[in-house]
Amino acid sequence: MTPAALTLPLDVARIRQDFPALCTPFHGKPLIYLDSAVSALTPRPVVERMIHYQSFEHTNVHRGVSTLSQEATDRFEEAREKVRAFINAPSAAQVIWTRGTTESINLVAQTFGRARVGAGDEILLSAMEHHSNIVPWQILAEEKGARIRVIPMSDEGELLLDGLEDLLTERTRILGVTHVSNVLGTINPVKEIIRRAHARNVPVLVDGAQGVPHLPVDVTDLDADFYAFSGHKMSGPTGIGVLYGRRELLEAMPPWQGGGSMILSVTWEKTSYCGLPSKFEAGTPAIAQAIGLGTAVDYLRNLGLERIAAYEHDLLAYATDRCRAIPGLRVIGQARAKASVLSFVLDDIHPHDVGSILDHEGIVVRAGHHCAQPVMTRLGIPATTRASFAYFNTRDDIDALVSGILKVQEIFK
Amino acid sequence: MSDPRELYQQVIIEHNKKPRNYGDLEGCTHHAHGLNPLCGDDIELKVVVQDGIVRDLRFTGQGCAISKASSSLMTVQVKGRPVAEAQLMVEQFREMIRGTLDPATDPNILGKLSLFQSVKNLPSRVKCAVLPWATLHSALQGEETVSTE
């Protein structure tokens, strides 16, 4: 696609044809998929690329001298380069394949964190983290006798950053913050947070699981020390994710898992490790998934992240207006900067009941605590219903959601 | 999937709004905490057993309409029954949800609880309906916490 085409609106009708599930009846009705924050649907080119790889090009990577192995390795490394360009990392060596955001964060906690955090030290997290950016740090804190401190948030769902410098103490060893909240949709000012943390010599890990699918991300501009994300939230497959890291940090970190692919030489006395990125990629990787993620990057870049962001912003504004007009519906998360997520509570109807009835209408949403129980506790609610949007959704989808919500109220009246 | 209206009948909506036997119970002989971590359904059940009879039982906690109505109806149906019958009801309720017992044709003591039969058509909600029963089972067995995961 030429740059000029990127200024045209997204051709969503055309895009939807890339998603067979959207063209297939579900409970006898059209599928309304409003759950991309849990996992985005996978467009046909990504699926086809993986089928092609697995059917014709597959063998193990970084092994042997066969042409097949060399070509598989080339495809695998091309995908890494695509991801590098996608997030503007300085080098592909700083793009580590993992199973997903969760594994990326665990990797940092168990290597960087374990080496850096000691008794009495502090790990600073935001009040709106997903469990995957809480629990790995709690495990580490428990092991080391360190403590977790929390950047608070407002009732609207914005981080309260006025007191950030007070929380960045001389004991703070790392700050973990989500780019976009999976529950509230809040886009956090991560660039500013990183700048202020760096002024206190505190490195920052950004959970980008909900960032990369919806916003252009430039890890160099953000000056992030670590940026973690998942393939399946950005139209790629499950089982593949990325850890980006600053080179000098990655180089200084000990390996995490040991095994094949990550060693230079092994003797009973002494083993030496590969450089980046192999040092952190023990064992046979998810090759088809990495290549599929590369194709997902192509797909998103063809659509244009700026265009996706603008289109989804419009959808979110429309959904927010329509939902707010429903008596008894309260939108949870009213930050000024939001992306693609609309959480709500409805009268005193439990979100699971809302979700079940919407499901019958062919509308897929998430209901529950969204793996962010501390957010629920902070807001004094047990759970929410969450609709999340992607570039393949339409205003018709949102109209169907609104009708579904009215039906729920009718059943519960 | 069947129409959710089959499950969300008026009785269930009504028990959700006005749960029976809701609240704390002093002097209980048995109690258990039931958790459905996936949904966040969470019930605390207290039971008074005397001379082999479930004299009283009450629950507190939070959950969806199905778990709340299931808890409420359970307390109504179990209160005053011998422990052995309560345990039989636990078993029959589970069998009904699994689809191995049809309350219309198979002998059973479920009574009104057959309202929950259509939960078997909503697999994602089975745990919500079964949670109070699993909790009652644990309480009567002397176990303190049960999770439906």
Image (tube, grey):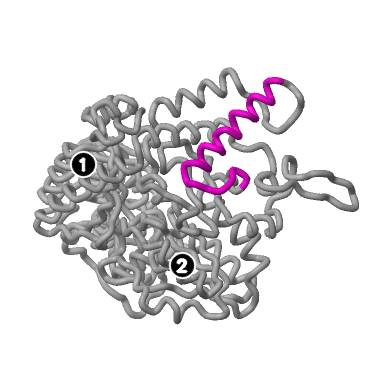
Closer to the camera in the image, B19 or A278: A278
Which residue corresponds to mark 1?
Answer: B4
- Return the chain for callout 1: B
- Whether A234 is among the magenta residues is no
Question: Looking at the rendering, in which quadrant would you find the N terminus of chain B?
Answer: top left
Q: Position of residue B145 (x, y in %)?
A: 46, 64
Q: Position of residue A21 (x, y in %)?
A: 32, 28
**Which residue position holds label 2?**
A195
Question: What distance separates the C-alpha of mark 1 from that of mark 2?
Answer: 51 Å
Label 1's element?
helix
User: Can residue B131 be seen?
Assistant: no
Considering only vertical position in the picture, is B137 above or below A138?
Answer: above
Q: Residue at x 37, y 35 (%)?
A: A41
Q: Residue at x 69, y 59 (%)?
A: A252
Q: Amino acid at mark 2?
A: Arg
Q: Which mark is residue B65?
A: none
Residue A86 lies in the magenta-colored region = yes
Badge 2 crowding class, 10 Å Cα cut-off, few under 14, some 14 to 19, many 20 or more, is some
Under mark 1, the amino acid is Pro
Image quadrant of residue A391? top left
Q: Residue furthest front?
A: A4
**Is A211 left, or right, of A7 in this rendering?**
right
Q: Are marks 1 and 2 on the same chain?
A: no
- Looking at the magenta stretch, what is its main secondary structure? helix
The magenta span reads A67-93
Of residue A239 and residue A218, the one placed in the foreground of this image is A218
Secondary structure at badge 2 equals: helix
- Binning the other alpha carbons within 10 Å of mark 1 as few (below 14), some (14 to 19) or many (20 upward) gives many
Of the two numbered discs 1 and 2 in the rendering, the one whose residue sits closer to the viewer: 2
Whether residue A302 is situated above or below residue A359 in the rendered picture: above
In the rendered structure, the answer to whether residue A5 lies left or right of residue A275 reads left
